[in-house]
Amino acid sequence: MADERNPLGDYIRARRELVTPEQVGIPVVGIRRVPGLRREEVAMLAGISADYYLRLEQGRDRNPSVQVLESLARVLRLDDDATAYLLSLGAEKPRRRRRRARKETVPPGMAKLVDALPFPAYIEGRYLDVLAANALATAVSPRLTTGANRLRDAFLDPAEQALYPDWEEAAGCLVAGFRASVGTDTDDPRFIELVGELSLASPRFSRLWARHDVVACEGELKHIDHPQVGLLRLNRERLGIGGNGTAGQTLVIYHPDPGSDSADKLALLASATRTPAAPQATGAAERA
């Protein structure tokens, strides 16, 4: 059976609908009945025929040249990450049999490193599953625990949403980062299961997913409204993990600015997570 999925067409259609005529210098006359640009406007600006552009959107031509894709990226105002994603969608790929879901395993050394770090830290898989987390990360958010999924918690758990004063922005970045992480590998059963579940359960996720945003969200400042210690301002770093079998795994670390109010609050949380040391035997007990 022919593959009916059309990721290239879906992507350029979604991005076309987000670009206004004013952004590309097209005067607006009368009432426009479509969001964003019309197909023929994109084709004109990209220097290709309207019929050829229509074939791309409909999936009747799935392997345009790099020059065509780069012209479309310019018209659709894509940044570097989104342009790279568009180019990957247009690259010819060998047909593959559908794979079984791949189990993601954290290297033992990385698991030890996460536990040893003095800051909240966890390891995230390519589908945003939490593969490992230290106690301080779980103290910041109880959902940061092995076996949880960052996307599912962000869109389906009100307690997780309440942690982020800027949840709308954070949710958009999370979805865009997820799409960047998965890339064109959309036949994986884990991907199909997760996107299908969230599309049905969360209208907000469905709307964000339909935008086809692609952003590799790396280091940034995160605001977390913690129920015990109040507002935390933490720098978030994302570091790719190398090695066999670790494709897509990322070490995520939250750290405060030294000497800041957030550093004091994080130290308070850290002290609460420490296991009390066993009492030392008294001298009299030792002599008995």
Image: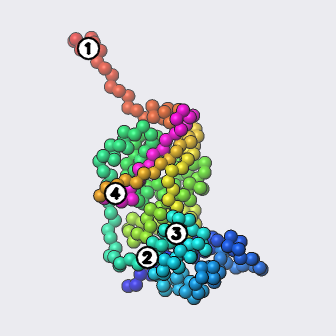
**Label 4: which residue?**
246
Q: Earlier in the sequence, mark 4 or mark 2?
A: 2
Q: Observer-nearest residue: 161 or 64?
A: 64
Q: Nearer the viewer, mark 4 or mark 3?
A: 3
Range shown magenta:
245-262
Tell me how far mark 4 sits from mark 3, CA to CA.
25 Å
Q: Could you tell which of marks 4 and 3 lies nearer the N-terminus?
A: 3
Dot 1 or dot 4: first in sequence order is 4
Q: Residues within 10 Å of mark 1 (few under 14, many from 20)?
A: few
Q: Earlier in the sequence, mark 1 or mark 2?
A: 2
Identified at 32% across, 70% down, the residue is: 99
Q: Which is closer to the viewer, label 4 or label 2?
A: 2
Mark number, residue 61: none
Q: Amino acid at mark 4?
A: Thr
Question: Dot 3 surroundings within 10 Å: few (below 14), some, or many (20 or more)?
Answer: some
Seen as rendered, the residue at the extreme right is: 30
Q: CA distance from mark 1 to mark 3?
A: 72 Å
For discs 1 and 2, the disc positioned in front in the rendered view: 2
First-in-chain label (2 vs 3): 3
